[in-house]
Image (tube, helix red, strand yellow):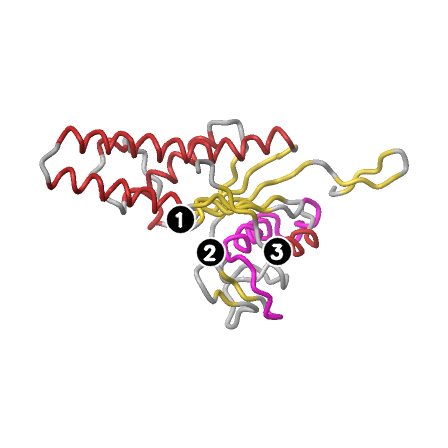
Amino acid sequence: TFFLTVHGTMRMNPVRFLSIDIGEDNLAACADSFGKSFLVDGRHLHSKNKLFFDKYSKAIDSNNVKRADKVKHTNYGYLKSYCDKSANFIKKKKKEKVIASILIGKIPLKKKLENVDFMDMKYNLPNISSFCFSVFMDNLKNSGFDCIVVPEDYSSQCSFYDDEEVSAHKKFAGKRVKRAVFRTQDNHRVNADVNAAYNFYRKHFGDGMKKYVHVEACKKDLLCDPKRIQPID
């Protein structure tokens, strides 16, 4: 149950779940079952990689193979370190709180995880997302978390704030107006990725969600701007 009776008083069950929506602008949108959310920045990661890629291209154009290899190795180290530290930030949360399980959105085909060695990949920008997702998720899965994969279908289109069932509708209560902005039925503008992460709870637990999720706290959190973290400045 969601509440415990301790010495005659009602206390919140300390067991928490963490829901994670994987994306481009946000490497991970994380929302726990007690209404606390944060974003692991992905834009910084991609802009940094583009800078490395420009340096690599210039080195190739000038036939400076030694310089190109150095840039490639430096970039590999930076990307892997960023993804590992992002996962470590979440693992730290596990030590601070009792996280029972992690709910992870099933990766769409366009974001398919690939078990590849980055150094053997053709060095181009489109492959970076697959590499980062793979490193990030493998780190979490190998850390002892109970990871539950939840289908992402309609999680970005339905409104958690309006208690909308996460399924196909002729008309949805809310609407995604921008890549990162979702508008609820009452015209509240909330973070689209965090909304999707909270919807994973509704998809997984169904009608029994209130036993495990502090719904009102999650709705209140949804109206606030989530904290954005960059594991490496």
User: The disc labelled 3 sits on which kind of residue?
Assistant: Cys
The residue at 22%/36% (across/down) is 121
Q: Nearer the viewer, residue 13 or 188?
A: 188
Mark 1 touching mark 3, by CB under 8 A? no
Task: Give the farthest residue toward the left.
Answer: 63
Q: CA distance from mark 2 to mark 3?
A: 25 Å
Question: SS of the residue at dot 2?
Answer: loop
**Quadrant in which residue 67 is drawn:** top left
Query: Which segment did they paint magenta?
Result: 185-212
**On the picture, is 132 further left or further right than 175?**
left
Q: Nearer the viewer, residue 92 or 148?
A: 92
Identify residue for label 2: 153
User: The disc labelled 1 sits on which kind of residue?
Assistant: Arg
Q: Position of residue 157 (x, y in %)?
A: 50, 62
Q: Position of residue 72 (x, y in %)?
A: 24, 33
**On the picture, is 187 further left or further right than 34?**
left
Identify residue for label 1: 43
In the picture, the quarter occupied by the N terminus is top right
Task: Give the farthest residue toward the right.
Answer: 8
Q: Is residue 103 above or below residue 191?
A: above
**Which is nearer the N-term, disc 2 or disc 3?**
2
Identify residue for label 3: 224
Whether the magenta-drawn stretch holds residue 194 is answered as yes
Q: Position of residue 172 (x, y in %)?
A: 53, 69
**On the picture, is 181 further left or further right than 124?**
right
Question: SS of the residue at dot 1?
Answer: helix
Q: Nearer the viewer, residue 71 or 180?
A: 71
